[in-house]
Image (spheres, rainbow, N blue to C red):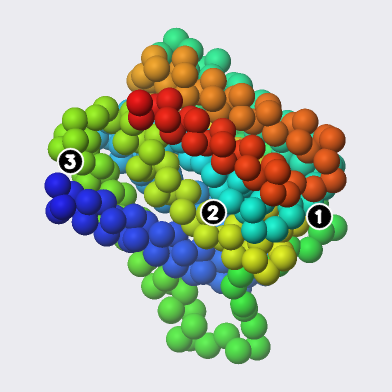
């Protein structure tokens, strides 16, 4: 069992490293071809930061472990809006940009509802995955159009006047290293999760909703805590909604196109209802408050604790 936990941890660490390295390398390569920071931020960075969840879900589907794939996405969405946002609220106030929040909330709610409708028959098939992915492309196109005047600050720096052959090769190697880390990290992560589920005698659904979901939500949690401590919380809510949108439309869309997913009845009738209820429950907090603070954080964390109790009891 200790070895399984170690394998799980190594896999998670490799996934996080792979995602970070892939973002750096691919972003700098894109900027080198004069692609605007806006496009890079809304496409390349968004897809790269979702890559760990994508590889985990895809490998789960290919290993015939669909509860890992669906549990990872549904659990991550619940963790993002209850755990991550709740913790961020305790560290600092989260201002509400009503225009952005309503747009992103509406898209997150609609995408989650559509996932529920598609999965209700117990299966997510190729054409449903294609619809999800096409909706993602439409959403990205809409974001590019409505935010074209906004400035997006990327975490990577690129100075074309200091661009050397070494820097070019390094960025290509970063992309290759990132891809390799994502692949092997996802394999180790899934293998460790499967063995752990067998060791402690729990279902793949429980492991997917807890261990996998929490593991793949760690980057968002750390990022939100650091941003809150620095007082840079203005994008926190929109980023978390964006992550949930990508989880559904990108990860489950691509995964089900490549390999149809059988959906556990309990995930449909319980976990997805929690996901939809939480997303819906955040709406009044946004509408009637100018910012989310300690009280909102306590409410969200209480919701998350209750959910954990319900699935682990």
Choose between 67 and 125: the one closer to the eye: 67
* Sooner in the amino-acid sequence: mark 2 or mark 3: 3
Residue 67, how many percent across, how many down?
Answer: 34, 28
Label 3 sits on a secondary structure element that is helix
User: What is the residue that sits farthest to the top in this orientation?
Assistant: 121
User: Which quadrant of the structure image shows residue 175?
Assistant: bottom left
For mark 1, what is the residue? 148
* Sooner in the amino-acid sequence: mark 1 or mark 2: 1
Instruction: Name the residue at 59% across, 51% down.
Output: 87
Instruction: Name the residue at 66% across, 51% down.
Output: 89
For mark 3, what is the residue? 195
Quarter containing the C terminus: top left
Residue 27, how many percent across, how many down?
Answer: 57, 66
Local crowd size for mark 2, using a 10 Å CA cut-off: few (<14), some (14–19), many (≥20): some
Tell me: residue 21, above or below residue 274. below
Do the residues bearing badges 3 and 1 touch, measured as CB atoms within 8 Å?
A: no
In the rendered structure, find residue 220 and report the number of the disc placed on it: 2
Distance of label 1 from label 2 (alpha carbons) = 25 Å
Tell me: residue 152, above or below residue 130. below
Choose between 268 and 81: the one closer to the eye: 81
């Amino acid at each position: 069992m200790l070895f399984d936990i170690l394998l799980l941890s190594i896999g998670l660490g490799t996934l996080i490293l792979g995602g970070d390295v892939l973002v750096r390398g691919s972003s700098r390569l894109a900027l080198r071809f004069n692609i605007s920071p806006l496009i890079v931020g809304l496409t390349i960075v968004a897809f790269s930061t979702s890559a760990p969840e994508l590889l985990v879900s895809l490998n789960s589907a290919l290993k015939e472990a669909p509860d890992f794939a669906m549990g990872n996405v549904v659990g991550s969405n619940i963790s993002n809006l209850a755990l991550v946002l709740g913790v961020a609220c305790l560290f600092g106030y989260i201002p509400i940009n009503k225009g952005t929040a309503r747009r992103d909330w509406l898209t997150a709610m609609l995408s989650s509802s559509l996932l529920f409708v598609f999965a209700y028959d117990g299966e997510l098939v190729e054409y449903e995955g294609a619809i999800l992915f096409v909706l993602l492309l439409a959403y990205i196109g809409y974001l590019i159009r409505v935010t074209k005047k906004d400035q997006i600050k990327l975490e990577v720096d690129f100075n074309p006047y200091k661009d050397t052959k070494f820097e070019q090769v390094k960025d290509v190697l970063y992309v290759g290293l990132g891809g390799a880390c994502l692949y092997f990290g996802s394999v180790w992560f899934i293998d460790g999760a499967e063995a752990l589920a067998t060791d402690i005698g729990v279902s793949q659904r429980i492991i997917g909703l807890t261990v996998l979901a929490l593991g793949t939500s760690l980057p968002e949690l750390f990022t939100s805590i650091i941003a809150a401590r620095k007082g840079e919380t203005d994008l926190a809510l929109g980023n978390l909604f964006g992550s949930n949108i990508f989880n559904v439309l990108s990860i489950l869309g691509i995964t089900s196109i490549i390999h149809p997913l059988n959906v556990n009845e309990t995930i449909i009738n319980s976990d997805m209802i929690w996901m939809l209820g939480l997303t819906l429950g955040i709406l009044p907090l946004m509408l009637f408050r100018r910012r989310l603070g300690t009280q909102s954080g306590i409410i969200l964390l209480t919701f998350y604790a209750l959910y954990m109790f319900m699935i682990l009891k």
